[in-house]
Amino acid sequence: MALRLWASSAANALKISSSGARAVAPAYSISRYFSTVLDGLKYTSSHEWVKNDGSVATIGISDHAQGHLGEVVFVELPEAGTKVSQGGAFGNVESVKATSDVNSPISGEVVEVNAKLTETPGLINTSPYEDGWMIKVKPSSPTELDALLDSAKYTKHCEEEDAH
């Protein structure tokens, strides 16, 4: 019984499912977890994303980042009016595993902060690209976006990083 419970727990952790059938064909299928990467966003190699809407850019951390962090329990963000620099830390995210700096993909002025994250930091886990956005910035140098990764390059970066 203990072995069956352990095997079931291990299968769940490895995302292996059993069809329940005892057929000649393999009864198990293995599916590897892949993070969601959205087209139309730009990404950094440190796993932040930015969505440019012309005069304002929305910034958050990627699904890949939140997956590695685990359950987010606290978020520290700057106040509106704060200047941010490309590559510079603007806040941090604390999870059950670690505390990590969050770096700005672009330079500019913070015009809005996601106040929902104060009460519900787990939105970063459940909705990293929608409800879990962190700050909105008025870009001071829109050409900085050109140096960021598109979805295909970011996906490749994540795959290479996870392979190590």
Image (cartoon, grey):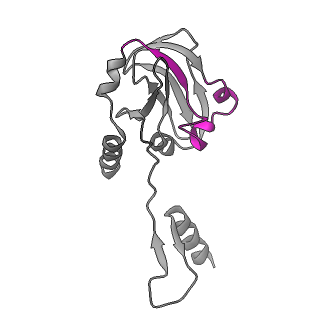
Percent coordinates x, y for residue 117 in the rendering: 64, 29
Picture quadrant where residue 46 is located: top left
Picture quadrant where residue 120 is located: top right
On whether residue 129 falls in the magenta region, the answer is yes
Image height of 46 relative to 32, above or below: above
Q: Is residue 161 left or right of residue 137?
A: left
Asked whether 51 or 163 is in front, the reply is 51
Picture quadrant where residue 115 is located: top right
Q: Which residue is outermost to the front?
A: 54
Q: Residue at x 54, y 8 (%)?
A: 81
Q: Is residue 115 left or right of residue 9?
A: right
Q: How many marks?
A: 0
Q: Residue at x 59, y 20 (%)?
A: 113
Image height of 17 relative to 148, above or below: below
Percent coordinates x, y for residue 14 in the rendering: 49, 63
Percent coordinates x, y for residue 87 in the rendering: 37, 21
On whether residue 164 falls in the magenta region, the answer is no
Q: Is residue 161 left or right of residue 40?
A: left
Q: Residue at x 45, y 91 (%)?
A: 24
Image height of 44 relative to 9, above or below: above
Percent coordinates x, y for residue 118 in the rendering: 66, 26
Q: Quadrant of the N terminus?
A: bottom right
Q: Residue at x 43, y 22 (%)?
A: 104
Asked whether 142 or 48 is in front, the reply is 142
Q: Which residue is outermost to the right?
A: 119
Q: Which residues are magenta?
A: 114-141
